[in-house]
Amino acid sequence: MENDELKERIHAVETAQATQAATTAGMEATNAATTAGLQATQAAAQAGTWAVMVAGSAGLIAGIFLGMAMARAKGKA
């Protein structure tokens, strides 16, 4: 009887260790995925910022030339 009880206790410890290892692996995988997601979000935000800055700069330059052309046309009229 004592031998069977010892086997059951060993099995319970093995099960608990396997559960803990699986939980730790899941936690590490979740952490890695979260980190990758944060990095992707930051890269996308930075790319979006640069795109807006480029578009704004192009609009500003086009506006300057358009304003100069309108002023020149108004002066000749």
Image: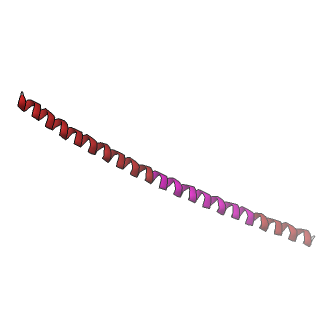
Above-or-below relation of 5 to 72: below
- Please give left or right for residue 71 compared with residue 4 in the image: left
Predominant SS of the magenta segment? helix
Q: How many marks?
A: 0
Above-or-below relation of 6 to 48: below
Outermost residue, top side = 77
**Residue 61 place in picture, x, y as percent:** 23, 42
Q: Which sits in the foreground, 40 or 31?
A: 40
Which quadrant holds residue 71?
top left
Indicate the quadrant containing the N terminus: top left, top right, bottom left or bottom right.
bottom right
Q: How is the image coloured?
A: secondary structure
Which quadrant holds residue 29?
bottom right
State the residue at coordinates (11%, 31%).
73
- Please give left or right for residue 24 compared with residue 18 in the image: left
Which stretch did the figure color magenta?
16-41
17 within the magenta span: yes
Above-or-below relation of 56 to 33: above
Outermost residue, front side = 76
49 within the magenta span: no
- Please give left or right for residue 67 compared with residue 10 in the image: left
State the residue at coordinates (70%, 64%).
21
**Residue 19 place in picture, x, y as percent:** 72, 61
Which quadrant holds residue 27?
bottom right
**Residue 58 place in picture, x, y as percent:** 27, 42
Indicate the quadrant containing the C terminus: top left, top right, bottom left or bottom right.
top left
State the residue at coordinates (78%, 66%).
14
Outermost residue, right side = 1
Q: Which sits in the foreground, 70 or 37?
A: 70
State the residue at coordinates (90%, 68%).
4
